[in-house]
Image: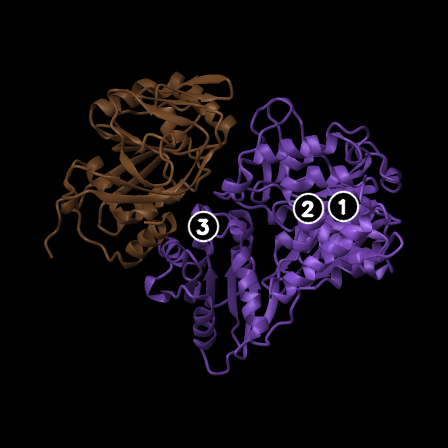
Amino acid sequence: MAVPLVPKLALARAAGALSRLRGGGATSVPGKLLLKLEPDAIGALASRLDRGSVLISATNGKTTTAAMVASILERRGLGLVHNQAGANMAGGIASTLLSAARPRGRIAGELGLFEVDELWLAPVAAQLSGLRAVLLSNLFRDQLDRYGELETIADSWVSALRDRPAREAMLVLNADDPLVADLGRDREGFVGDGEDRVGDVRGDGNGRVVYFGVEDDSLALAGMAHAADATHCRRCGAPYAFDAVYLGHLGHYHCPSCGRRRPSPTVRAGAVTLEGVRGARFRLSVPEGAAEVKLSLPGLYNVYNALAAAALAVALEIPLAAIVAGLQGSRPAFGRAETVTVDGRETRILLVKNPAGCNEVLRTLALEPGEHDVLGVLNDNIADGRDVSWVWDADYELLAGRVRSVTCAGTRAPELALRLKYAGVDPHRIRVIDDLAQALTAAAADRPSSDGAEPLYALPTYTAMLQLRELLVRRGEASSSWR
Amino acid sequence: MALSTSTGRTLRVCALYPELLNIYADRGNLLLLRRRCEWRGIGFELTGSSLGDSLDGRGHDLFYIGGGQDRDQQLCAEDLLRTKRASLHEAAARGAAILGVCGGYQLLGHAYAIGDEEIEGVGLLDVRTVRDPGPRLIGNVAIEVSLEHELEPRMLAGFENHGGRTRLGADARPLGHVLKGHGNDGRSGHEGARQGATIGTYLHGPLLPKNAWFADWLIATALRIDPSELSPLEDGLEREAHRSARRAAGV
């Protein structure tokens, strides 16, 4: 006999309360238990959402992009069920739904907004009968010990999108990432195939595609960064040729063998101005028109995040003015370009977790004049990837000649220090303090001048970012984001 | 200070398929070689040789082959046989150093398996890489190696991530024996392979930053001098990084 859902929800909630009492921050504990008791819990709870759900996946920018989408939708008065703390495997999503579930089959919210881990896209999508849109932003080299090769993830996405309900949801894809753009090629009548179907962008999905992309030649890099991944045409197997490279392997490309080109996007960013670590501006074009957007988040990577959020909003029929207001009102997500005060010193936390993301943070930092104080934290816990090779793929050379001091902390601190030495940072400016609390105190205290106006830049890996925030909360210098 | 015998020399390195075989931060290996030569006043020349390029077997002291995605590695395997095999054999015969890491190690053998297919390698190492139904061999690893010019066995630390199981033939010696981790096949206790100055290993991380002493051994071997002839460097951070990688492996 099937046990009804309600007692299972109660049990999972109790487990979550117990885990919090014991000081655990793990937001996925109750959800994991719930999924053990009821494997279809995500589908069952999400079916209570009147307006269905949307999914967001990517290697980089999931949390920030979802926060931007939330900022847009909440301004429209939409009630969201959103895994905003970034717990993005099935357990985290189930936990989010669980905490929104109310008695008598109700739920506190209308639309589900879920960021989902790359490898969890297929199983989560399969459960969401009310799936309206899937936003896929980028695929970069990341944690090869956990995720495997890029092509393997791309293949798993292909199969995730092949079946219902994803097959019938609107697809929102980055035209500039060939691996991602190819996912929309087989769909009938994708928007941006050169035919004028602008009016079709709105509506209920029906498996259509909205492409977004950057169109600004002034941003093009001289060549591919070292960490850029070779990408091949999925139709004929030849390597793509790039006419412009913006970020990693994102850019304008074509296949020299079969002639396949980057789809031309309907949601575009042009006239991009990067304002160091403070923000960025760009001109956003959507089928309805165009407008200036001023972001308080820095770097081209956040322009891409904003563009992705805008494209998803277009798919959800949100007017341009509301999109712009939502983007401009976006604040940094948890540990992503967040600013805190440590012992009276302004400290900016910039999450780095893989070469492509790290390069964008370093590129953004390099736009700031003067020499910087940096706290680099390299951990090798499972969520960071046990393999720390990737620091040699990231372009720390961008810091050479630009740092006054670097403090290296974390479980693999000496290996980060060595990377910086070989990147050309003066070894006398590098120190290793494995313990994060001691390193933070030392780095904050070591100020270039008494007025202390220069910020400290903290560059932690994922679990290091969580530890750093926990330390700051304990010191009363940041608010807890655990809910 | 007396100039060491290496000053005024140039280490000529050739990286094979650097834009395809680089997924485990292979660039870190090349950077170690470059800096450690430059800091000693040894010249450093790096040449890339990719798909379709010919290879000068006499023009380089050290050849480096890294690892790539399956599809890219297969493209490289075909190209190696077609355009570079003879030159590599010529280089090995005259004593040039050849280092293959991960996929590069597999390519140096007679053949490696991918799915149900067997791909032919250049056959510089008497090894063969097969598949078995077990999981990928992933994790931190430490091995003990005994090399000429070194007075006692030394340790190499790194990270391995491979699906293939590599079996040694009669002509290949293991590079080292496993202290922690899986090694060639998770069973034999062997890691890597060596024939003369041709070396293959699954250790990335990358290998040379985690083991700066081995970078020096390679430089010396490629230049055909004794490592003790290389002038010493300020290696405090290098030693700390080596210890950190060993700690991660549990040694």
The residue pinned by badge 2 equals A90
Q: Nearer the viewer, residue A204 or B95?
A: A204
Residue A173 visible in rendering: no
Residue A391 disc label: 3
Which mark sits nearer the N-terminus, 3 or 2?
2
Q: Read off the chain for label 2.
A: A
User: Looking at the image, which residue is at 44% across and 48% down?
Assistant: A388
Residue A404 at x, y = what percent? 42, 68
Q: Nearer the viewer, mark 3 or mark 1?
A: 1
Which residue is the extreme one toward the front?
A1
Which amino acid type is marked by label 3? Val
- Mark 3, Cα crowd under 10 Å, few <14 / some 14-19 / many 20+, is many
Residue A469 at x, y = what percent? 57, 66
Residue A289 disc label: none
The residue pinned by badge 1 equals A42
Which mark sits nearer the N-terminus, 3 or 1?
1
Looking at the image, residue A400 sits to the left or right of residue A230; the answer is left
Q: Quadrant of residue B109?
A: top left
Query: Quick check: do tags 3 and 1 share a chain?
Result: yes
Quadrant of the snapshot with the C terminus of chain A: bottom right
Q: Read off the chain for label 1.
A: A
- Mark 1, Cα crowd under 10 Å, few <14 / some 14-19 / many 20+, is many
Element type where label 3 sits in the image: helix
Q: Nearer the viewer, residue A384 or A5?
A: A5
Which lettered chain is shown in purple? A
Quadrant of the snapshot with the N terminus of chain A: top right
Which amino acid type is marked by label 1? Ile
